[in-house]
Amino acid sequence: MPLNADGDVGYGSVSAGPGTVGLPGLAGNMGGTETVPLLMPEPEPEPEPYRWKPLSKEELEITAGSPGWKKFRSRLVILFWLTWLAMLGASIAIIVQSPRPVAPKLRWWQKVVFYRLQPALLMDSEGGAVGGFEVMRERLPYLKSVGVGALILEGVFPKSISPSNLTELSHNIGTMPQFQQLLKEGHHAGMKFLLDLCDVEVLEQEPANTSEGLSDSSGYVQYSLKFWLEQGVSGLAICDTDAAYSEKTLMEWKALLQQFSEQDNERVLVVMETMDSFVASNVSSGGVNASLVELTTRPLLPPSAHPLSAAEVASVVEEGLQTPRTEWPSWTVGGPVSPELQRISMVLLMTLPGTPVVSDGEEVTPAENATVNAIGDEIFIQDEGKKWRSAIGLFQSLSEMRAREEALLFGSFTFLSFNASTSTSPTPPLAFLRSWGCVHFLVLLNLGTEPHALSPDWAPSLPEGGVFVTSTGMDRLGAVSLETLSLRPHEAIVIKLFEGGSYS
């Protein structure tokens, strides 16, 4: 029941009635009503801070097997593979669209090393016991192992005052069956054969068989050349002093060679120059249409009655390196030089743009004061008590390097000059660069008798480091810094340059 029956004052209030004594001001001070609650509420406790607790094994199994988590995982896997495929596609697109050099298609005669050989000299070196063709057949594995790809056979036709028959071979070097066996084994080993006609007056020959309908010397020559092409010969070689070196004759021969050319065995015509290689030739000056000749062989060094000095070789080579070339050349060593300079010439021969032509014996160039020894088919040298080395090692190294490196086959050529501020030697070194894409080969030639250290400001655009590929001494190995490199006297070095400390 309500405590205040009158109902004037609500619950919890105390009224000062008229009979109340000593509390006259209570109701007035409180406004006639007591508003303070009788019970004070206790303060609410502050919430505890959140603490992360790992899921238990049971909770984890329940959560991982939930439908939401399965859906999240499947979408995450799909997103990963889509991202990976997008990155792969972007990488392929960048590689495809990035500019890169297009490798030209080289013909077989642009990729191989030619080797000039006289079978008669081989027979004489063996004491004349067997024919020259038989000795050549025994030497085929050796020639193939050192990198020879084509043989130019010299002196295979008989020499006599009367006109000789171009369909017959010189009897002192072998028979036709022996020659055919030589061609068969050589072709099986991947080697080509060319016949040298420089010593034969082909235009003065008379038809040997009138039944063939050959009424003039030109028809007889065509018949003879066709005979050898049918035997499997891959080309012919003539000299620029021959009477056959005329546009009319070359056009006839070119048409005949094209009849026997195949996709992997194109028949070629080679012209041997007998003049200074750095003087304009008949082919390049317009005397004969250059398109009629596949190879024009030029000597690196001019002919001379005495061995050329280092200064003479340096002068001629430097002039030749600065002469621009438009056609595909072919190089021989040329004039006589000392063994040290001939090794440098061999390096130059195998690293210049074009096809190298090496004469028999030039691949073996022992240094002065060296003891030469032969063991079987291998020739070795020993220099003043040093260990035995193969004298053909340099030639083999150069031929293998040229065969596998695109920069040395069809790369660009850049001559690098040593000015007066970087060289005080009377015979300054020579240098050039062969480049293809991001691959660069630096060829350094020191023909002088003094060592030469490279100046840091000689070629600032070149990479600072590289790796030795080969050298004339065959003793340069490993990485090299151009800032610390010093060329020895009569030394040639080939270096493969690389960027950023990488050998790639």
Image: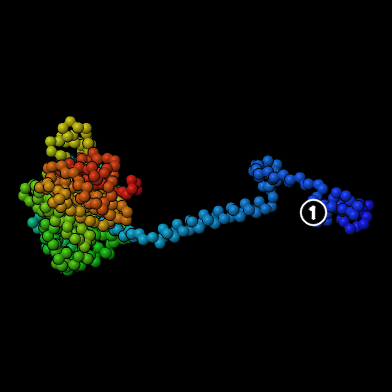
Q: Position of residue 26 (x, y in %)?
A: 82, 52
Position in image of residue 364 (x %, y %) = 18, 42
Which residue ends up furthest to the left in the rendered image? 305
Circle 1: is it few (<14), some (14-19), or many (20+) Cα within 10 Å? Answer: few
Vertical order, 333 against 260 (above or below): above
Q: Tell me where residue 470 sits by quadrant.
A: top left
- Which colouring convention does the figure follow? rainbow
Q: Residue at x 16, y 64 (%)?
A: 283
Name the residue nearer the viewer: 369 or 458.
458
Closer-to-camera residue (138/177): 138
Residue labelled with disc 1: 29
**In terms of depth relative to the viewer, which is nearer, 228 or 77?**
77
Q: In this image, 239 relative to 414: left or right?
A: left
Residue 490, by quadrant, is: top left
Q: Amino acid at mark 1?
A: Asn
Q: Is residue 10 visible?
A: yes
- The structure residue drawn at horizontal position 69% and vertical position 45%, both measured from the top left corner, is 47
Q: Position of residue 401 (x, y in %)?
A: 28, 48
Residue lying furthest top:
385
> Could one spot residue 125 in this view of the protein?
no
Q: Position of residue 196 (x, y in %)?
A: 18, 55
In the image, residue 275 sits, relative to residue 498, either above or below, namely: below
SS at mark 1 in the image: helix
Residue occupying the point 23% across, 56% down: 413
